[in-house]
Image: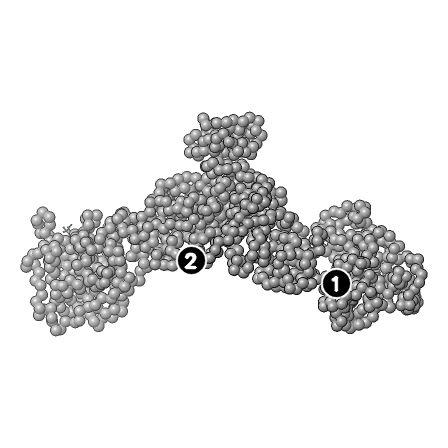
């Protein structure tokens, strides 16, 4: 071969490599059989120009081997620009394949039985020309480096024009003498006439070659040979796909140059995969972290235990403890179970394939998880999903599926070194080429083929929050806590937030003695001089979840300790788990006899177990001497102790220095929003929003897991301190309540992206009467107040009296506080002033709300079609009875006033999905409410000593009384008939009463 080719740089390729399908037997030099053409014949002036072949082509050839009575067909592919060529031959139904790997100087012969032989192209002339032992049954394949090459070497004789298969052709003849084998024969070859329009569009293509000669066989007798080679479907490019240049899938070529070793994987990675089997495709997301011995995979179960439905699931495996957390992502249900033997592929009937959980990966080392510990042979380069890949192949006898071992052929496709991968995760590993692209597992005995497609393969540590087992624990099984690190946290330091989080998580795990998995929902955040780590510590998984149950079986001859009167398998598991005499790896428990037998023996080899219907065998999933997990309270105590000792430290490696931070404070005085009441978004209306702002260092309470409106509701209902503002971190859903009202100290407000600052708006507690003053003669006056909200806050916070209203006059920046409600104010005080607004406390303010409750209906009065605040107003204004509380039922917009109250213990509230209970706390004057209907509506004894102003007011009031009196009967009728009350009438009466108070 090589001798027939031109050298081209370092890569030798056959430039004119018409891999002609010529079958040449041992042709000896029959001296006179064939004459070389004379110079005159070679240089015939009438000859057409000698044909040229395209640099890439493909063609079909049919060879009639007349002397042996058979036909053989073949396909040739030649791709000079890409340095590759191949030839496949079909004879008697069997296909032989030759692949020329010029880049690596190799030639592969693949037999019909898929056996492969590798030869060095450089040394392969004889093999190539005269055949290989394994294809001895065939006439020897003769790949000249082209008919033309021979012709040029031996000189061509132009014979003339003729017709072959009806095609006009030029006939050439070469008398070949081949010194290497001392053979000669006549080669007649026909190329299309220059004027013939070929299908390929290329002029002068081969149509036929004919070989006639004599060979001497090994016994010395002569043998005549005569072959025809007809070329059809010649194309001036390779139209077939690249697989024609690849050794077939699943074929190992022993001795093939190992141009790449099987790639190694990092200790952590993330990927998605599609598992393709006969039934369809299953998608799985995998997060793997060998450093933490954690793995999560998200998939869709098919109703198998423990899922029982088809909801998308996330299963988190903690290989520190052998426990799996099976989380239904839709319902957020969690089952804590032992990691199943064979892990993902448990409960699989292989033949059912993809209706099941066929899954190849097992949590072992990265090598094992991908079965890279097999003895892989390089299988060459092939394309997968359009990516050039290096393919590795291995035969394994221990492929585990559905708890059984199978013989399997694994073909691994890794991204070729020449390709790059740019991932979008993390910043330490931009990609590289150690990227698995595809794994094909063929189980010949089943038979079945499963293809694993890997996508988004990133060799990055998964975000720690990925391993979130918080749905598996709640209430008393959790402790939320906050660690404080004092220090200086300026912008350059804050860049390292993730590192702080990661390091603290490790430090906390070490300090508690718990698996890092148990530090759930970790967050880290900074203030100028403090940093906080907030997380929830969860309890250890139940001990029994660390053992795999094998029902109806017991261990024979390996019982090391037995206990009697053990009432549950859980208790027996605890004995095994905490056993100090020896490492207990398994136990038998028999519920009927209550016998618990512990054993050092932990093999699941199926030999040592005997049937016993009364008992179960339990095998530790992690076959090692793992320390018992610390219980929640112990872990929490450990953490507190370690913080007190200053032992919870983290070291952050900054580019130019290492800094150590010590946790100096730990507190569980934070609540998580697990059992909060739903609250209305409208609560947010009471807050003024400043985007991307915070007030650092003034957090009085941190709440996690709240929505922004729930955060607002928490602020409004906070009892322990006056919550005046809150910050909300949209990234983590964390809510920071503060007593600081940033309006008062605006310089405390700092910029911080991702945080919104909500400042409580006190005007929300008041109703506005625009362009009006009521309190101009109040002696509680604040000046230099610049907004109504601030004035409202002064009223709310004022201690001198119960502030029920205020006036705010914008132009003079003056805030007047008043004791009376607008409706109770002397009419004479109500003045029009366009530059001032009057605000009176909402009636609702006199009530305390108990959401989703009602009290037994005492139907003093029911009004429909109004809102809750109108209902409050009706209650306050009710004259015919003393309204002590009301139910407001949102579904019916129904207001139910009643004399009953939970306050005096008259009735007990009952939960109700649609109604809220409002219990009256005070009268509008701020005095505590007592069930005394006469308080407001019976004339009080008048006080002596009217002031001038109030006399004037009284005088006007009396006039109004005179006007109104005529209508009084009508008014009373309307009220009794439960019609809308009339403010005018109330004004008059309140006016009168208040005037007497004033
Ligand atoms: C090929 O077939 C012809 C015709 O049947 C027969 O005469 C000849 O002997 C055969 N040759 C071989 C090698 O079998």
Instruction: Tell me what residue is drawn at x 52 percent, y 34 percent.
Output: 577
Mark 2, secondary structure of its residue:
loop
CA neighbours of label 1 inside 10 A, class few (<14), some (14 to 19), many (20+): many
Residue 684 in view in this figure: no
Q: Is residue 663 above or below residue 208?
A: above
Which residue sits at x=68%, y=58%? 740
Name the side, left or right, on which 671 lies relative to 887: left
How far across and down, in percent of the image, does residue 518 sit? 54, 45
Q: Is residue 17 left or right of residue 544?
A: left
Q: Is residue 20 left or right of residue 781?
A: left
Up the image or down, 633 lies above or below 947; here it is above
Is 144 in front, or is 416?
416
Estimate how packed mark 2 is, as few (under 14), some (14 to 19) or many (20 or more) residues with alpha carbons within 10 Å. Answer: some
Q: Quadrant of residue 472?
A: top right
**Quadrant of the rendering where the N terminus is positioned:** bottom left
Mark 1 or mark 2, earlier in chain? 2
Residue 558 seen anywhere in this rendered image of the structure: yes
Question: Viewer-proximal residue, 131 or 479?
Answer: 479
Q: Nearer the viewer, residue 28 or 128?
A: 128
Q: Which residue is mark 2?
A: 430
Mark carried by residue 792: 1
Q: Is residue 494 left or right of residue 853?
A: left
| Residue 210 location (% of width, % of height) | 16, 60
Q: Residue at x 9, y 65 (%)?
A: 37
Query: CA gap, disc 1 to disc 2?
Result: 56 Å
- Comparing marks 1 and 2, which lies closer to the viewer? 1
Quadrant of the frame with the C terminus = bottom right
Mark 1: which secondary structure? helix
Residue drawn at x 74%, y 64% is 791
């Amino acid at each position: 071969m090589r001798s027939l080719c031109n050298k081209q740089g370092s890569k030798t390729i056959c430039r004119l490599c018409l891999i002609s399908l010529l079958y040449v037997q041992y042709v000896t030099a029959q001296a006179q059989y064939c004459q070389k053409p004379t110079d005159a014949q070679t240089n015939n002036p009438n000859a057409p120009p000698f044909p040229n072949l395209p640099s890439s082509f493909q063609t079909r050839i049919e060879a009639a081997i007349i002397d042996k009575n058979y036909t053989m067909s073949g396909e040739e592919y030649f791709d000079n620009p890409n340095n590759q060529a191949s030839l496949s031959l079909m004879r008697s139904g069997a296909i032989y394949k030759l692949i020329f790997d010029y880049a690596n100087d190799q030639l592969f012969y693949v037999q019909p039985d898929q056996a492969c032989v590798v030869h060095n192209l450089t040394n392969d002339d004889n093999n190539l020309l005269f055949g290989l032992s394994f294809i001895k049954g065939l006439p020897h394949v003769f790949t000249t480096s082209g008919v033309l090459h021979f012709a040029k070497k031996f000189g061509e004789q132009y014979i003339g024009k003729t017709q072959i298969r009806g095609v006009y052709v030029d006939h050439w003849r070469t008398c070949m003498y081949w010194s290497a084998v001392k053979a000669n024969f006549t080669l007649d070859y026909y190329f299309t006439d220059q004027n013939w329009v070929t299908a390929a569009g290329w002029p002068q293509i081969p149509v036929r070659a004919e070989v006639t000669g004599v060979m001497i066989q090994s016994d010395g007798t002569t043998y005549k040979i005569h072959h025809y080679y007809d070329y059809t479907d010649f194309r001036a490019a390779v139209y077939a796909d690249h697989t024609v240049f690849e050794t077939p899938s699943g074929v190992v070529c022993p001795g093939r140059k190992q141009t790449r070793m099987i790639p190694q994987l990092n200790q952590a990675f993330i990927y998605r995969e599609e598992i393709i089997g006969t039934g369809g495709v299953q998608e799985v997301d995998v997060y793997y972290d060998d450093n933490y011995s954690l793995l999560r995979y998200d998939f869709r179960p098919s109703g198998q235990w423990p899922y029982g439905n088809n909801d998308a699931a996330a299963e988190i495996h903690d290989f520190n403890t052998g426990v799996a957390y099976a989380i239904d992502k839709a319902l957020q249900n969690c089952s804590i179970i032992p990691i199943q033997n064979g892990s993902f592929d448990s409960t699989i009937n292989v033949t059912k394939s993809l209706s099941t959980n066929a899954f190849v990966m097992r949590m072992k080392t990265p090598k094992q998880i991908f079965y890279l510990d097999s003895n892989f042979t390089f299988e060459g380069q092939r394309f997968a999903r359009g990516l050039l890949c290096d393919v590795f192949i291995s035969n394994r006898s221990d492929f585990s599926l559905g708890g059984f071992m199978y013989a399997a052929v694994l073909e691994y496709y890794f991204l070729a070194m020449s390709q790059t991968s740019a991932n979008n995760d993390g910043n330490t590993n931009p990609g590289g080429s150690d990227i698995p692209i595809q794994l094909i597992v063929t189980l010949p005995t089943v038979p079945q083929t499963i293809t694993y497609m890997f996508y988004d393969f990133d060799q990055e540590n998964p975000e720690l929050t990925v391993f979130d087992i918080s749905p598996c624990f709640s209430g008393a099984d959790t402790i939320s806590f906050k660690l404080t690190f004092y220090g200086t946290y300026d912008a350059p330091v804050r860049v390292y937030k993730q590192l702080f989080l990661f390091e603290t998580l490790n430090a906390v795990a070490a300090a508690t003695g718990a698996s890092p998995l148990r530090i759930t929902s970790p967050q880290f955040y900074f203030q100028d001089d403090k940093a906080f780590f907030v997380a929830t510590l969860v309890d250890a998984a139940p001990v029994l979840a660390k053992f795999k149950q094998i029902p109806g079986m017991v261990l024979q001859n390996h019982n090391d300790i037995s206990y009697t009167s053990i009432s549950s398998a859980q208790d027996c598991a605890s004995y095994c788990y905490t056993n100090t005499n020896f490492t207990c790896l398994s136990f038998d428990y028999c519920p009927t006899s209550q016998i618990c037998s512990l054993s050092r023996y932990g093999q699941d080899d199926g030999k040592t177990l005997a049937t016993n219907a009364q008992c179960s065998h339990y095998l530790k999933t992690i076959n090692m001497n793992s320390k018992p997990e610390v219980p929640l309270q112990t872990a929490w105590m450990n953490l507190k102790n370690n913080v007190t000792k200053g032992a919870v430290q983290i070291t952050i490696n900054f580019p130019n220095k290492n800094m150590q931070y010590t946790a100096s404070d730990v507190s569980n005085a934070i609540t998580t929003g697990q059992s909060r009441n739903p609250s209305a978004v409208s609560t947010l209306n009471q807050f003024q929003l400043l985007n991307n702002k915070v007030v650092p260092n003034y957090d009085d309470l941190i709440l996690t897991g709240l929505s922004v409106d729930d955060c607002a509701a928490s602020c409004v209902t906070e009892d322990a301190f006056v919550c005046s503002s809150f910050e909300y971190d949209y990234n983590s859903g964390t809510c920071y309540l503060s007593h600081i009202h940033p309006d008062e100290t605006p310089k405390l407000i700092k910029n911080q992206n991702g945080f919104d600052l909500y400042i409580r708006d006190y005007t929300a507690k008041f109703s506005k009467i625009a362009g009006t003053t009521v309190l101009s003669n109040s002696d509680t006056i604040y000046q230099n107040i610049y907004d109504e909200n601030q004035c409202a806050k002064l009223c709310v916070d004022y201690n001198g009296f119960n502030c029920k209203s205020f006036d705010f006059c914008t132009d003079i920046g003056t805030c007047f506080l008043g004791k009376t409600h607008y409706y109770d104010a002397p009419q004479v005080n109500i003045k029009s002033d366009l530059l001032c607004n009057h605000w009176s406390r909402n009636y609702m303010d006199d009530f305390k709300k108990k959401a989703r409750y009602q009290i037994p209906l005492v139907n003093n009065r029911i009004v429909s079609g109004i809102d809750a605040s109108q209902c409050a107003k009706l209650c306050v204004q009710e004259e015919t009875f003393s309204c002590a509380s009301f139910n407001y039922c949102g579904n019916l917009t129904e207001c139910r006033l009643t004399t009953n109250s939970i306050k005096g213990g008259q009735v007990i509230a009952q939960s109700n999905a649609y109604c809220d209970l409002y219990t009256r706390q005070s009268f509008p004057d701020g005095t505590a409410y007592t069930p005394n209907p006469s308080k407001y509506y019976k004339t009080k004894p008048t006080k002596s000593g009217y002031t001038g102003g109030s006399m004037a007011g009284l005088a006007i009031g009396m006039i109004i009384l005179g006007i109104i009196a005529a209508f009084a009967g009508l008014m009373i009728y309307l009220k009794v008939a439960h019609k809308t009350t009339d403010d005018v009438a109330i004004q008059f009466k309140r006016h009168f009463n208040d005037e007497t108070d004033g």
